[in-house]
Amino acid sequence: MNVLIAGVGGQGVILFSELLSNIALESGLDVKKSEVHGMAQRGGSVNTHVRFGPRVASPLIEEGTADLLVAFEKLEAVRYLHFLAPDGRLVYDDYRLEPVPVQLGLVPGADDADLDERIARRVGKRLMVPAFAAAFKLGNQRVQNVVMLGAVSGFLPFGEDACREMVRQMVKPEFVELNLVAFDRGLELATA
Amino acid sequence: MNRKLLSGDEAIARGAWEAGCRVAAAYPGTPSTEILESLAGYDGVYCEWSVNEKVALEVALGAATSGVRSLAAMKHVGLNVAADPFFSAAYIGSNGGLVVVTADDPGLHSSQNEQDNRWYGMAAKVPVLCPSDSQEAKDLTGLAFDISEEFDIPVLLRITTRIAHSSTVVELGERAEHPPRGYVKRPTKTIILPAFARARHVDLEGRVDRLRAYAEKTPWNRAEPGDSNLGIICDGVAYQYAREVFPGASFLKLGMVHPFPVELVRRFAAGVSELVAVEETDPFIELQVRALGLAVTGKDRLPRWHELSPRVVRRSLTESEPPPEPEQGLPNRPPALCPGCPHAGLFYALQRQPVIVGGDIGCYTLGALPPHEAMDSCIDMGASITFAHGADKALGKDDKRRRVAIIGDSTFFHSGITGLVNTAYNKSDVITIIADNRTTGMTGHQQHPGTGRTLSGEPTVEVDTARLARACGIEKVVEVDPYRPTETRKRLRELFEEPGPAVVVSKRPCALLVRLQDPPKSVDREKCVACKTCLRLGCPALTMKDGKSHIVATLCAGCGMCADVCPKGAIS
């Protein structure tokens, strides 16, 4: 299975990928995860590739073959749509973070309705999850990633409990409770 | 079985620990940084952040000569800095195993070029190992120590960003202790005076000949038989991409690309109808195959620049359907200075001033981009000061644009000090600004000689940049606070008017290092006149909304730089 995770540097894409790939590892599969550190992390567009199965060669997902695209921000969702397989699924947060050059008025921004239209035109299986808003309501916007994990858990072959267990193992002890609540909130949002 | 997901960097650290490595040194540099960060978590290995890569390699060479297994890690361009001791180390040899890790960056994710450091192995006559996943990264690290000791030679372990930052499954082993071999005085080996070095060169060629024979028989250079119509010769992550695209083909996978296994390649080529070299950036393997007089394709079909990927390999080598097109017309999202970044205040102070600014390597290189555009060059670590000095000598007094250098604190320790001494000694009027954010920012907050802490977190001497600048021969040293951009701007203007060199220490901790506790700022819409002065900070939390300046509360770090620059007092 090929899962591409997209977002903006600082949104927690890397922890999400770490959780997902370790859940896959625990289930006995071969796993490869690829990400980029350094300059791109400074508020830039970031993406992480996670692949798992009986045997994985390339750490990179090929365009047109992602089974699942998880996007933490709507513009970033659209930026990576071409990675989705024809029957691939998109789970995205419609939260918007304007690129800095747009905020500063240096280049025109993307129109919200236009982004919606591009998603609708290109993807059949799509689910919008307001994960940032949910995380903000829970009192910590940084759990957006675990809300997203809860939301996509139903589309992964591992089961909810395997996901919860990994959250317990990998999140700092003082944040485990909050993250488990965030996970459940994501589950609810996906099934609502 | 103890399986774990490790990045290539973490796997190299694990491999070094299991192989009994006792001394390791590095300067942080993406994508190599996590090697030492990870290795420092193991017992029994002394680890340090050296001030630069040349120092790190010399430290490792000194330790290896003293009889213990030692490692130096760096990004690809770091090996340029360390090239001098690297070439000497080949003559001198090892005693305790000496492994040099180079992390190349095809695709320039966080670098200034795409140089292919496999050539360094050939140039310095040092064996080169290229892992293609984390398990191999761990295993080849161990092998590199063995080869180094068996053949009395340093070994270059070459990874790329996709190996360094991809996590794959690794089986963990235990540490094998290699008792120190002790220091034995061997001047004809370790002192490369011309008379001794002449003999060492002959000796080195003999060692390389023995390694040539080794390359033919090592199981790490292996043929994987498949369809004989297509034979692929490859190394590193390119192997994984080619495996993905041609699962049934015959493969010759090289774990050791230098010395080149000539006979193995000839045998493999004889058994396939078509031979293709699949490798990233330069045709390192391909040229050596061609030198054997064998028919091979490679860079005539595959790109010589940027990263390979399964798609690039497929598109280049097969008649495949074109891939789905990315959506067009979307705004890019380049990296930007973080909310609360002290560099933003400094660049605000420099905007629209009559200056020529030599830039350097770090987060602050982003000051070259809009809205700051406060930089004229970025060359390599430490080149800001020397570039400005050269410009000063060329332009002379007639050109009124003041020559300025901007360099980070960690970069200053890395290679700025010599340049600063040079400006003082050779009398130029350069204003050197040390953007001192109390850490090595871009690579993720590593300690350096100015932070007062070592890699392992122990307290140590805190080298004072201002005193150091004075000792370099610069008498005028001033300190500014970039969180007060207006005052900083005024102070810089004064300095630009005064003759003679100066050093400005712009001091504030990185906003990610010291999370500010101040509440988010907000804009009084009544007072705001939409002059957009605040936007010139380039802060990600600042934008325009309904014709007035607006602060995105969820992003704001509360630093107050925007309040400082607002001419109407509209921000608080």
Image: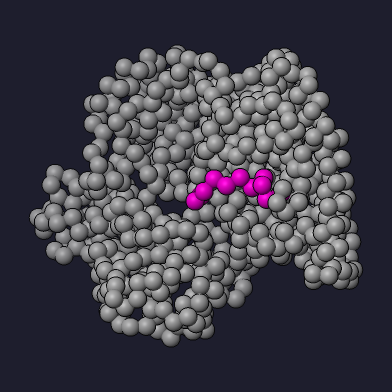
Q: Is residue B358 magenta?
A: no
Q: Residue at x 35, y 72 (%)?
A: B395
Quarter of the figure with the N terminus of chain B: top right
Rendered location of residue B398, percent (x, y)? 29, 76
Q: Residue at x 48, y 23 (%)?
A: A63
What residue span does the magenta drawing correspond to? B111-121
Residue A125, above or below B11: above
Q: Residue furthest front?
A: B293
Q: Residue at x 74, y 37 (%)?
A: B255
Q: Is residue B112 magenta?
A: yes
Q: Is residue A185 visible?
A: no
Left or right for A142, reference B205: left
Characterize the magenta stretch by its predominant secondary structure.
Answer: loop
Q: How is the image coloured?
A: one colour
Image quadrant where residue B133 sits? top right
Left or right for B558, reference B427: left
Rendered location of residue B373, percent (x, y)? 31, 57
Out of B426 and B457, give the one closest to the viewer.
B426
Out of B255 and B73, give the one closest to the viewer.
B255
Q: Residue at x 38, y 38 (%)?
A: A135
Out of B218 and A140, give the one closest to the viewer.
B218
Image quadrant where residue B252 sits? top right
Quarter of the figure with the C terminus of chain B: bottom left
Q: Is residue B226 visible?
A: yes
